Image (spheres, rainbow, N blue to C red):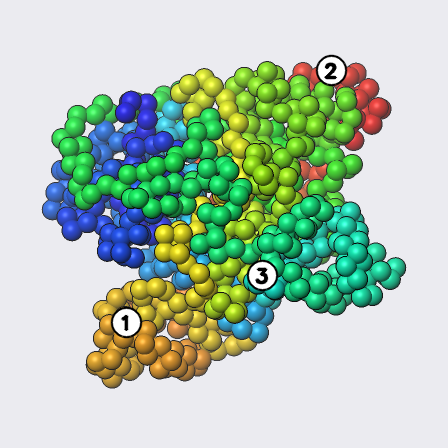
């Protein structure tokens, strides 16, 4: 272990443990501080919970309250304190100017609800995630395997790296990560539809709210996919239907119009469903992909090791003699973590007596600047996954240059069905979807399908630190810009590719959208109420997860370059990124959706409240909280009922308890019910939609999460804010998204050194817009 490898001390919680796991995957030394009796996950799922979350970490046992000096000694030689404790360890970190102190809490450190209790379900409710899943006429549905906790974790890992990067130019700092804000920033169009169209979309059920995709039942399970996003995909699907005699009336000329198909999508989907239902799921996906159509089988976790793409890319790890999920990307320089050791309690007590030099603190006079100030990113991404990655980088100060082309238009600028705007849906500069994920960036309009356009791109590459693209696996090589060429142009370049399947493996050429990636990852198959009632994950959660993981990879690679002088290619597979968010599902062989329930706690659920489509999420984590709940709903008799004294007993009597809780909640506004329960320390929260988040949530308002900005074409609107709050080097929404090609001349002049005459000639030749 060298001094240059950062040491992270983790005071764990459900909202930090994934961050610690990700940092292990990056090669950092993560020291888990356990109580004398061992971390509680050692007693969960027969120890599988500890194996998943904490394998690869080192372990020391300390009672910080009884032995603050021991924790202090550990922190004096550490780089980062990853702090999930409810009250925080500011006292232990006081005066340690080198320390990057990342506090991760359900609702953040400031605001009227900073002291509220939060679980994955409650944070997902108050963050807007629950409003994104489920049938329109049924209860909101929790995404499986603690997706709110995972979003907090990956944001916390990014926060750690941003803090370390900022420390090169100044002292360590306190970083405030709100899990609720992490969720609220990850809803795809959930809030944007309200901000830009005054519209609150209903829960989508099994159909994507914007693109013509959904969940379809196959002969032996489910497949995810749809009509695709281009005329070619529709034509190919229709040709397949015709070959099999299953086209019904879809050959009529009216169906060539995408607007007509969208207007009568239910009918089109029924024809497709009748066809899909005759096929085994794996066969259908293989046949579809052979035609370059975006479909995937909906797999369950026990099926993942048999996925030939994941196996070929050596995605999985071995931990404690078991096969577990791997990490979202290979790092550094393409190396995979394939084996992890599960530490015993206090296996590394020697660290408490180790004399480790205090990490250095930079002093370059650049304090207060965003953490990524001075980093230049060439952004070749489009739609959501890639732009979300570069949005994170831009929010924290990177100069992101978005390369666009009217000959290869971004659907979030041009496609009517993805256009969110109060005005006409024909102006590429007014789409709220595009404008949200591309704020803080500059735009250059360049035709990369011309030889001169690629030449310009090469010159830009030479002057950038990072290149990010989310094309299919062969596009860059066909442009003559594979990594071998990029490395010759710029040896220090950090090149992040983020195709659906990755650049290698037997399925590298598969066409993928967010919903098909989620289908292949196991996430869709676990979203629902039971084995015969899968609802699926339809909105772009997978794209956002991939974008966050790509941002983490980028900052990690920049740190690696600072240490070694070497750039690298991060071959991120969106499938692997999403699969890495499946928690303990592989170790426990999860095979069926479980709705809103929890494997250990009871009761946990979502209950209808006063008003149209108003709901309350509640988690009871202990027998003490059950007693408090009974007092809050004025049913002390339930607390005295021997059948209900334990979580197992309450689970057996779930019908009784859900009936009582449902009757109590039905007569109350959801916010009032949540406040009554939170006053007694019980995790509870209203299920909030985009309107609630933007207009009514007091915590997000106090944290100034939504930021008003003026766009030159779309006017003034609210932007979703930055969920990671660095106190010393803050990120921010500095500028609205650019209009198409707004910065072409300036970028070519400032970055590549082009003369005005050269720019003029390129424009006259049609290379520039």
Q: Which residue is mark 2?
A: 755
Q: Which residue is mark 1?
A: 648
Vertical placement of residue 28 versus 176, above or below: above
* Secondary structure of residue under mark 2: loop
- Sequence-wise, the earlier of marks 1 and 2 is 1
* Secondary structure of residue under mark 1: helix
Counting other residues with Cα less than 10 Å from the Cα at mark 2, is it few (<14), some (14-19), or many (20 or more)?
few
Q: Which residue is mark 3?
A: 222
Counting other residues with Cα less than 10 Å from the Cα at mark 1, is it few (<14), some (14-19), or many (20 or more)?
some
Q: Residue furthest bottom?
A: 637
Q: Position of residue 382 (x, y in %)?
A: 65, 40
Counting other residues with Cα less than 10 Å from the Cα at mark 3, is it few (<14), some (14-19), or many (20 or more)?
many
Q: Nearer the viewer, mark 3 or mark 2?
A: 3
Q: Is residue 192 visible?
A: no
Where residue 176 sits, quadrant-wise, is top left
Q: Position of residue 71 (x, y in %)?
A: 18, 38
Residue 433's disc number: none
């Amino acid at each position: 272990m060298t001094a240059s490898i950062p040491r992270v001390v983790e005071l764990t919680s459900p909202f930090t443990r994934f961050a610690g796991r990700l940092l292990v995957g990056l090669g950092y030394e993560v020291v888990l501080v356990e109580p004398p009796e061992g971390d509680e996950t050692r007693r969960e799922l027969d120890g599988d919970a500890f194996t998943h979350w904490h394998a690869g970490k080192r372990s020391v046992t300390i009672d910080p309250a009884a032995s603050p000096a021991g924790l202090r000694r550990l922190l004096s030689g550490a780089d980062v304190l990853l702090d999930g404790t409810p009250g925080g360890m500011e006292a232990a970190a006081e005066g340690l100017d080198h320390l990057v102190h990342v506090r991760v809490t359900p609702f953040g450190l400031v605001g009227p609800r900073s002291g509220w209790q939060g679980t994955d379900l409650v944070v997902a409710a108050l963050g807007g995630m629950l409003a994104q899943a489920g049938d329109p006429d049924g209860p909101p549905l929790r995404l499986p395997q603690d997706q709110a906790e995972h979003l907090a974790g990956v944001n916390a890992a990014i926060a750690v790296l941003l803090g370390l990067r900022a420390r090169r130019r100044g002292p360590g700092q306190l970083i405030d990560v709100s899990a609720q804000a992490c969720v609220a920033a990850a809803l795809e169009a959930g809030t944007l539809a309200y901000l830009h169209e005054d519209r609150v979309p209903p829960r989508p059920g099994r159909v994507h709210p914007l693109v013509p995709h959904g969940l379809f039942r196959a002969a032996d399970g489910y497949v995810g996919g749809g009509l695709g996003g281009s005329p070619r995909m529709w034509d190919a699907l229709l040709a397949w239907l015709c070959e099999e005699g299953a086209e019904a009336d879809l050959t009529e000329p009216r169906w060539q119009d995408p607007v007509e198909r969208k207007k009568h999508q239910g009918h089109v989907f029924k024809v497709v469903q009748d066809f899909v239902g005759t096929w085994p799921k794996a066969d259908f996906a293989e046949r579809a992909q052979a035609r370059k159509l975006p479909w995937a089988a909906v797999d369950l976790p026990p099926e993942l090791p048999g996925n030939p793409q994941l196996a070929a890319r050596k995605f999985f790890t071995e931990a404690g003699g078991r096969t577990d999920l791997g990490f979202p990307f290979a790092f550094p320089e393409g190396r995979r973590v394939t084996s992890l050791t599960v530490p015993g309690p206090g296996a590394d007590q020697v660290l408490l007596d180790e004399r480790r030099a205090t990490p250095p603190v930079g002093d370059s006079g650049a304090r207060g600047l965003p953490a990524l100030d001075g980093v230049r990113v060439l952004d070749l991404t489009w739609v959501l996954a890639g732009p979300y990655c570069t949005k994170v980088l831009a929010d924290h100060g990177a100069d992101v240059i978005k390369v666009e082309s009217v000959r290869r238009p971004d659907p979030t600028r041009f496609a009517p069905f993805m256009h969110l705007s109060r005005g006409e849906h024909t102006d590429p500069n007014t789409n709220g979807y595009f404008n949200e994920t591309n704020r803080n960036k500059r735009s250059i309009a360049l035709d990369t399908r011309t030889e001169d356009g690629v030449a310009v791109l090469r010159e830009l590459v030479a002057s950038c630190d990072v290149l990010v693209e989310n094309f299919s696996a062969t596009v860059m090589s066909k442009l003559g810009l594979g990594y071998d060429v990029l490395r010759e142009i710029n040896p220090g370049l950090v090149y992040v590719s983020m195709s659906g399947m990755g650049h290698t493996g037997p399925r590298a050429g598969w066409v993928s959208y967010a919903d098909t990636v989620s289908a292949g990852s196991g996430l869709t198959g676990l979203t629902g109420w039971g084995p015969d009632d899968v609802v699926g994950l339809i909105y772009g959660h997978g794209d956002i997860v991939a974008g966050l993981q790509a941002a983490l990879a980028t900052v990690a690679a920049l740190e690696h370059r600072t240490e070694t002088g070497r750039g690298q290619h991060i071959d991120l597979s969106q499938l692997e990124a999403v699969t890495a968010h499946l928690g303990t599902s592989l170790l426990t062989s999860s095979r069926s959706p479980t709705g809103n329930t929890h494997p250990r706690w009871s009761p946990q659920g979502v209950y209808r409240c006063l008003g149209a489509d108003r709901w309350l999420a509640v988690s009871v984590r202990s027998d003490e909280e059950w007693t408090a709940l009974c007092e809050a709903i004025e049913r002390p008799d339930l607390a005295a009922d021997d059948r209900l004294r334990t979580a197992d007993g309450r689970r057996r009597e779930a019908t009784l308890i859900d009936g009582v809780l449902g009757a109590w909640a039905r007569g109350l506004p959801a916010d009032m019910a949540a406040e009554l329960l939170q006053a007694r320390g019980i995790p509870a929260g209203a299920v909030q939609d985009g309107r609630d988040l933007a207009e009514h949530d007091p915590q997000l308002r106090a944290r100034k999460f939504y930021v008003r900005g003026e766009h030159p074409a779309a006017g003034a609107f609210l932007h979703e804010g930055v969920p990671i709050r660095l106190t010393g080097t803050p990120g921010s929404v500095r500028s609205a998204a650019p209009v198409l090609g707004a910065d072409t001349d300036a970028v070519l002049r400032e970055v590549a050194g082009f003369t005005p005459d050269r720019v003029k000639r390129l424009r006259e030749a049609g290379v520039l817009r």
